[in-house]
Image: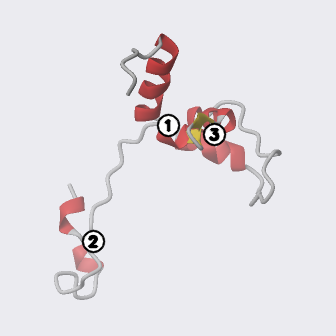
Amino acid sequence: MDGTSLTAEQDKINALRQVLPEAFNEGKIDWEKLKTTLGEDINFSNERYVLSWAGKSDAFKVLQNPSTKTLIPAKDESVNFDETENNDNNCFV
C-alpha cells in the first residue's frame, strides 16, 4: 500500500466486487456479466462458444426471481437414506 486513500469510484467498485464477484473478469467489471446477473438486456451474441436454446434469456430472468421454496428430503422414498454418503443433513432446513 502506498498510503493513498481509495477514490469514491474504487470504493464503489470494491463494494460491487464484494456483492457481485461474478460480474468481474480479470479484475475489471464485465458489463455483459453484470447485465446478466441483474437480469437486464441479456444478449449472448458476443460469446464465442454458446449453448443456445429457445427461451434461454427468459430462463435467466426467472433465475432473478426470489424463491420461497425449500428442498426437503423424501426419506420414505429413498433407499438406505441414513446409511448413504450422498446426503448432507446439514443442508436441510
- On screen, residue 65 versus residue 72, left or right, reads right
Find disc 2 in the rendering and name its residue: 74
Which of labels 3 and 2 is toward the front? Answer: 3
Give SS at disc 1. loop
Q: Residues within 10 Å of mark 2 (few under 14, many from 20)?
A: few
Q: Report the amino acid beneath label 1.
A: Asn
> In x, y percent, where is residue 8?
47, 11
Q: Are marks 3 and 1 in contact (CB under 8 Å)?
A: no
Q: Report the amino acid beneath label 2.
A: Ala
Instruction: Determine the image quadrant of residue 11.
Output: top left
The front one of 34 and 91 is 34
Tag on residue 33? 3
- On screen, residue 54 versus residue 82, left or right, reads right
> In x, y percent, where is residue 85?
25, 82
> In x, y percent, where is residue 25?
60, 43
**The C terminus sits in image quarter:** bottom left
Find disc 1 in the rendering and name its residue: 65
73 versus 13 height, above or below: below
Q: Earlier in the sequence, mark 1 or mark 2?
A: 1
Q: Earlier in the sequence, mark 3 or mark 1?
A: 3
4 versus 75 height, above or below: above
Q: Residue at x 41, y 42 (%)?
A: 67
Q: Earlier in the sequence, mark 3 or mark 2?
A: 3
User: Distance between the Cα atoms at labels 1 and 2?
Assistant: 26 Å
88 versus 85 height, above or below: above
Q: Residue at x 43, y 37 (%)?
A: 66
Which of labels 1 and 2 is toward the front? Answer: 1
User: Distance between the Cα atoms at labels 3 and 1?
Assistant: 17 Å
Give SS at disc 3. helix
Q: Residue at x 73, y 49 (%)?
A: 55
User: Distance between the Cα atoms at labels 3 and 2?
Assistant: 36 Å
